[in-house]
Structure formats: structure tokens, C-alpha cells
């Protein structure tokens, strides 16, 4: 989804771990811009501004402008990013240039709405199987999310990707029979009361008070 956002980027003449550390200390982070048959460009951007976009309602599907060295803005999308494994801060991002006149394939989130009849009245369990589906459309037609109303969903019923109502400008890429959400019955062992432990096998007691297994080997019995 296109947003009226412009992020400033400064070109980077050097690369490497030392340069990346220096950038992060200064409040910037390394990034690369590529795509649309142009050479890749190494730049530095603000991790705070990028984080706002990633945590927005449109997330990584947000199309925004990046202006390199004060030049004209180019529409881009965030296609890859790295976080620090412990601190969680952004370390690096890849930005792909976007041709607004060319369709692209994106993954769009699936949101569930309502309380399923199979859960409320039949004691079933609602499971969200696929949190995203893949579609193809023009950049300006990317939906923020798809909403699935599960109110009338009964036990053993499902909503599949092919059941979604898509705009004419949107083509479904995910398999039409891919299950998005369904209602299942509780497992037998969860629904049924726990079985009582089976009684222990009886032991054979000999006259002298010693015990032996009921199924002793045949060879031993012959010796006796």
C-alpha cells in the first residue's frame, strides 16, 4: 500500500563491519537499494524511521519514498531486514525499487473476525492455519489485510483461500484450496474422561510363599 512517507538516505562509499558499527553508533544503519534494472546503491538510513514503517498497519508491504542525498524520492519496499538477536534493534535492511505500473507478488495478512458457531455452541476449537496469503496486483492496489468472518463456521467447516472476495485488480497466487481457518472437534483424549488404570496382572503364588511370573518359560516349567 502506497503511503506518503519519505525517508532520507545518505550514500555509503565504504562497506564492512567497522563502517556498519560506525553508522550504528551515529544513529544510522546500513541499507541497500536495488531493483528496476538499476545498479544497487549502498546507503545509510534511520533505523527509527524504518521501524515505524515495519510496525505500522501495512508493515513490510508499505510502499514509501527514499530520497538519496537530497535527490528525488523513489518508491521502495522493505524486502529483507535483520534484527540484533539479543537487543532487538535493526541492523540492516534491503530496499527494493518499485515500478508503480508493474504488478508484483506480495504476502498479505489474514485477520479473523467474529466468534465461530462451532466454538460457541458446539464446543469446537478454532484454528488459524494460514496467517498470510499470496496475491499479485499493482503496488497501489495492495490491501492492508484480508478479513475472514468466522461467525457461521461450524465444526469441520473451513474457510479457504479461494473463498476470499478479491478485487478485480487482485489475482490469488496461493492455492485456492489452502485452508485459512477451520473449526475442529476436540481430540478424543481431551474430550473423553480419562480411563482408569488397568488392574495389574495377577501373580501366581507358590505354596512356599515365593512368587513367579504367570508366563514362565516352558523350559523352566519342565525342570519343575
Image (spheres, rainbow, N blue to C red):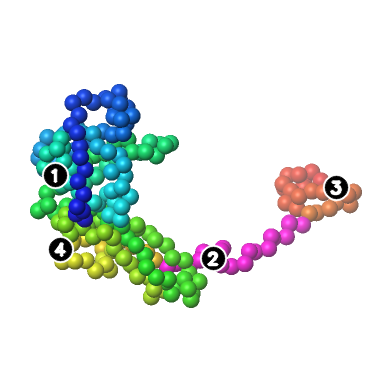
Q: For the residues marked 2 and 3, what is the alpha-carbon distance in whole angstroms?
A: 43 Å
The answer to whether residue 133 is visible is no
Q: For the residues marked 1 and 4, what is the alpha-carbon distance in whole angstroms?
A: 24 Å
Read off the residue under disc 2.
Answer: 188
Read off the residue under disc 3.
Answer: 210
Q: Residue at x 42, y 37 (%)?
A: 87
Q: Which residues are magenta?
A: 183-202
Q: Earlier in the sequence, mark 3 or mark 4?
A: 4
Residue 60 pos. (x, y %): 27, 49
Confirm whether the magenta stretch covers residue 88.
no
Q: For the residues marked 3 and 4, what is the alpha-carbon distance in whole angstroms?
A: 85 Å
SS assignment at label 2: helix
Q: Residue at x 14, y 38 (%)?
A: 70
**What is the quadrant of residue 37 in the picture?**
top left
Q: Earlier in the sequence, mark 2 or mark 3?
A: 2
SS assignment at label 1: strand
**What is the quadrant of residue 151 in the picture?**
bottom left
Read off the residue under disc 4.
Answer: 169
Amino acid at each position: 500500500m502506497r503511503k506518503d512517507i519519505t525517508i532520507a538516505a545518505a550514500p555509503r562509499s565504504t562497506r564492512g563491519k567497522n563502517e556498519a558499527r560506525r553508522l550504528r553508533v551515529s544513529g544510522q544503519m546500513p541499507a541497500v537499494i536495488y531493483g528496476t534494472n538499476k545498479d544497487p546503491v549502498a546507503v545509510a538510513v534511520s533505523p527509527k524511521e524504518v521501524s515505524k514503517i515495519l510496525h505500522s498497519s501495512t508493515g513490510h508491504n508499505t510502499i514509501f519514498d527514499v530520497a538519496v542525498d537530497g535527490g528525488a524520492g523513489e518508491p521502495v519496499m522493505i524486502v529483507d531486514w535483520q534484527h540484533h538477536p539479543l537487543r532487538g534493534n535493526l541492523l540492516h535492511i534491503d530496499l527494493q525499487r518499485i515500478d508503480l505500473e508493474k504488478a508484483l507478488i506480495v504476502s498479505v495478512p489474514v485477520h479473523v473476525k467474529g466468534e465461530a458457531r462451532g466454538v460457541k455452541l458446539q464446543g469446537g476449537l478454532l484454528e488459524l492455519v494460514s496467517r498470510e496469503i499470496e496475491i499479485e496486483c499493482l503496488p497501489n492496489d495492495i490491501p492492508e489485510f484480508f478479513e475472514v468472518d468466522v461467525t457461521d463456521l461450524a465444526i469441520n467447516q473451513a474457510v479457504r483461500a479461494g473463498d476470499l472476495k478479491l478485487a478485480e485488480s487482485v489475482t490469488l497466487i496461493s492455492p485456492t484450496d489452502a485452508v485459512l481457518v477451520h473449526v475442529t472437534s476436540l481430540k478424543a483424549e481431551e474430550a473423553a474422561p480419562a480411563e482408569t488404570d488397568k488392574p495389574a496382572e495377577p501373580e501366581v503364588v507358590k505354596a512356599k510363599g515365593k512368587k513367579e511370573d504367570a508366563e514362565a518359560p516352558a523350559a523352566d516349567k519342565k525342570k519343575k
